[in-house]
Image (cartoon, rainbow, N blue to C red):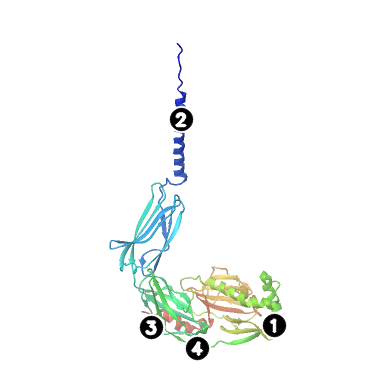
Amino acid sequence: MRKIMISMKPKKNLTLYMIAPIAIVVVALVAWLFLGQRLEFGKPSFTSNGEIRTLGSQTSLNLTFADAKSGLAKTEISLVQDGKTIPLSTMAYPPGKYRNHSVSVVVDAAKLGLREGPAVLHITAKDNALFSNSIAVNRPVTIDFGPPQIFSPNMQNHINPGGTCVVVYRVSEPVIMTGITVDQLFFKAYPITLSGKPGFVSYFAMPMDAGSRPVNIRIVARDQGGNEASMPLPYLLMKETFRSDTMATSESFLQQKMPEFQAANPQLRGKTLLETFMYVNTRMREENNKTIQNVCRNTTPRQLWNGTFLRMKNASPMALFGDRRTYLYDGKPVGESIHMGVDLASTSQAPIEAANSGIVAYTGPLGIYGNAVIIDHGLGLFTLYSHLSSISVKSTQPVSRGGVIGTSGLSGLAGGDHLHFGMIVGDQFVNPQEWWDPHWIQDNVLRKMAVSF
């Protein structure tokens, strides 16, 4: 009898064939969990644009949620008061699509039926991880419908067209914005101490044409809840007359000054001397003034100056603030400008001193102003020194009243050696002559700063 031998190898192979696909699936699942960052335990997070303490009539909440690994799955923002939950925002996100997302909500507490008093801001976020990591944060807030109260001393403000006014006042609660509005312009106020109490001071500029039209001047303040208050500022407008004149633009002046502008500005090459002058007097002048405004928007939030501002020594005035000029070429008008400073002439390359203590905010070439220096005196007050032949200070350098910062010259749009001296409040030019007058400073600045109310 022949023995039949049965091999067991096929069973072993069959088992392997069954196990292999399962193993591949398991490996693929584990890889998907890890590579897809689903198997992670980091919680999502959020940041807010400013500290959230008070909610009012029109409060903007700006939150940025983030989860760098598995991405955001859901975010919720709600308010809780007296056991009642009021949803503000609920957002669901496609899996793995959003690693961060900003949510903006405008809270109108009155329309939502909230009352003044304490409440809780409830913020939650979940991610797309396998175990849905989440955060839940409760922040106590105060619901406040009332705008801040503004307290200003009952003082008459005497203001010249083109001049400066200084205002001090107090508010009843912490604010996130306050200052002076002059028509559409805003002049920021800065915290100070008034007779041992917290207050604010703002320097603002009166428009040159104020004598020919009404000017709306108000103190404004907005609290942390978005509630805003304003009150009119009483003032007495003084009389001011600005000069008008015509200036002949000679061929020799054009030949002397325009080539340097053409060399420095490729867009002017190929233009005639007269075309260059017309461009320089209009577009370049406008661009240069915008540069000055941008520089003067960053100021030290405290007073750096002390005493009367210095006037250039032994210098004769050549042009005054507010002079309206019409330029003539061959007897025909070719341009206009308003002189926004005072031109002072002494000897050639005369030393130029800092009018008061401060910090150098700008040095270098500045188009029509030539080589220029701008000094920050704090609280939005600046001085401009232009047409210099040399500069001896650097940007961010502290300077003392009377310290030499350069020498006079005729750089830029200057026909002769002189200093163009300007003063800026906020980002608006004002008449420097007020700041050279110790009586004006005493009556319109120092006396106000010493008031008790």
Q: Which mark is residue 250?
A: 1
Viewer-side residue, 33 vs 69:
33
Return the x and y of residue 390 as percentages of the image width and height.
Answer: 63, 72
Look at the picture and state if 190 lies above or below 320: above
Q: Earlier in the sequence, mark 3 or mark 1?
A: 3
Viewer-side residue, 179 vs 203:
179
The residue identified by callout 4 is: 239
Q: Earlier in the sequence, mark 4 or mark 2?
A: 2
Residue 22: quarter of image: top left
Tell me, yes or no, whether the two marked residues, 3 and 2, touch with CB atoms within 8 Å. Answer: no
Viewer-side residue, 152 vs 351:
152
The residue identified by callout 2 is: 16
Please name the amino acid that badge 3 sits on: Asn
Please name the amino acid that badge 1 sits on: Ser
Separation (CA) of disc 4 from disc 3: 23 Å
Q: Nearer the viewer, mark 3 or mark 2?
A: 2
Separation (CA) of disc 1 from disc 2: 102 Å
Please name the amino acid that badge 4 sits on: Lys
